């Protein structure tokens, strides 16, 4: 059995990750590629409960360390119960956010030490890394404008613009350091152009 491919979609708020995940699922289904669609934080019953704790604007402030550890706790469940079994069965896994989000949000946004994130990444994931990461990049204001159309604002969306500028910068630094894995696609243009660029980025994996 050939192991499936692991593809992640990344980017700041409102850049179009969920929209393009749906598009990609259709592309795979048309090509008869078996696919599992997932999101982080979340993806299992317990990980979705952790997502709720992480995104809820509750009364008790969540410390930076708690936030980081809960992200990896949810990820450990997700890997064990969804991602690894699907890849082992030959399915492709399409995931809305993964560990690059932790480097961007907890590392860039919250200024947490990269070395701590790297240690947790090794501890939780072993050798697991995405085969391809599509980084949708747009000016912060563009993404926020799109995200604001929604009724609910989660805990992260309540952050200052400067937080999201740091997140964007951290993503671009990651992309520069991992040019083979991370493909940056400009997301501040018509959706059809974004989707053409996504397909182009996928071609090497289809070969
Ligand atoms: N987080 C997550 C961490 O801090 N650390 C971690 O390790 C992880 C895994 C999760 C939050 O958790 C944080 C980051 C996040 O803040 P989420 O809901 O998964 O939250 O992520 P969000 O970024 O908040 O999701 P959004 O729904 O806001 O953004 P999307 O999915 O990027 O955007 P989407 O597809 O919903 O599109 C937004 C709107 O824009 C339109 C869409 O139709 C939609 O209305 N749109 C476009 N309009 C014009 N042109 C285009 N090209 C468009 N593309 C989309």
Image (tube, rainbow, N blue to C red):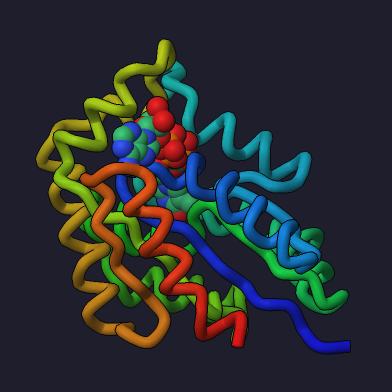
Relative to 202, 127 lies left or right: right
Q: Is residue 158 visible?
A: yes
Q: Nearer the viewer, residue 157 or 200?
A: 200
Relative to 31, 144 lies left or right: left
- When the figure is inspected, residue 6 is found, relative to residue 155, above or below; the finding is below
Which residue occupies 22% across, 45% down? 188
- Location of residue 191 in the rendering, given as x and y in whole percent from the top left corner: 36, 44
| Residue ranking furthest to the top | 151
**Quadrant observed for ligand 1 in the rendered image:** top left
Which residue occupies 30% across, 72% down? 114
- When the figure is inspected, residue 130 is found, relative to residue 12, above or below; the finding is below
Q: Nearer the viewer, residue 197 or 99?
A: 197
Q: Quarter-wise, where is residue 144 in the image? A: top left
- Location of residue 13 in the rendering, given as x and y in whole percent from the top left corner: 32, 39
Q: Nearer the viewer, residue 120 or 180?
A: 180
Which residue occupies 57% across, 82% down? 205
- Location of residue 52 in the rendering, given as x and y in whole percent from the top left corner: 58, 30
- Location of residue 7 in the rendering, given as x and y in whole percent from the top left corner: 56, 68
Relative to 8, 83 lies left or right: right
């Amino acid at each position: 059995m050939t192991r499936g491919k692991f593809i992640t979609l990344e980017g700041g708020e409102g850049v179009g990750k969920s929209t393009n995940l749906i598009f990609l699922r259709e592309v795979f289904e048309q090509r008869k590629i078996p696919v599992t669609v997932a999101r982080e934080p979340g993806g299992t019953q317990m990980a979705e409960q952790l997502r709720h704790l992480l995104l809820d604007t509750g009364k008790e402030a969540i410390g930076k360390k708690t936030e980081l550890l809960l992200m990896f706790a949810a990820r450990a469940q997700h890997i064990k119960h969804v991602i690894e079994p699907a890849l082992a069965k030959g399915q492709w896994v399409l995931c809305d956010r993964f560990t690059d989000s932790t480097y961007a949000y907890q590392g860039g946004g919250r200024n947490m030490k990269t070395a701590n994130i790297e240690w947790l990444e090794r501890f939780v994931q072993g050798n697991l890394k995405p085969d391809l990461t599509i980084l949708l990049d747009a000016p912060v204001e563009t993404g926020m404008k799109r995200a604001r159309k929604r009724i609910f604002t989660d805990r992260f969306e309540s952050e200052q613009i400067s937080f999201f500028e740091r997140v964007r910068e951290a993503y671009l630094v990651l992309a520069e350091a991992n040019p083979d894995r991370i493909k940056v696609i400009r997301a501040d243009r018509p959706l059809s152009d974004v989707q053409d660029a996504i397909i182009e980025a996928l071609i090497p994996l289809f070969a």
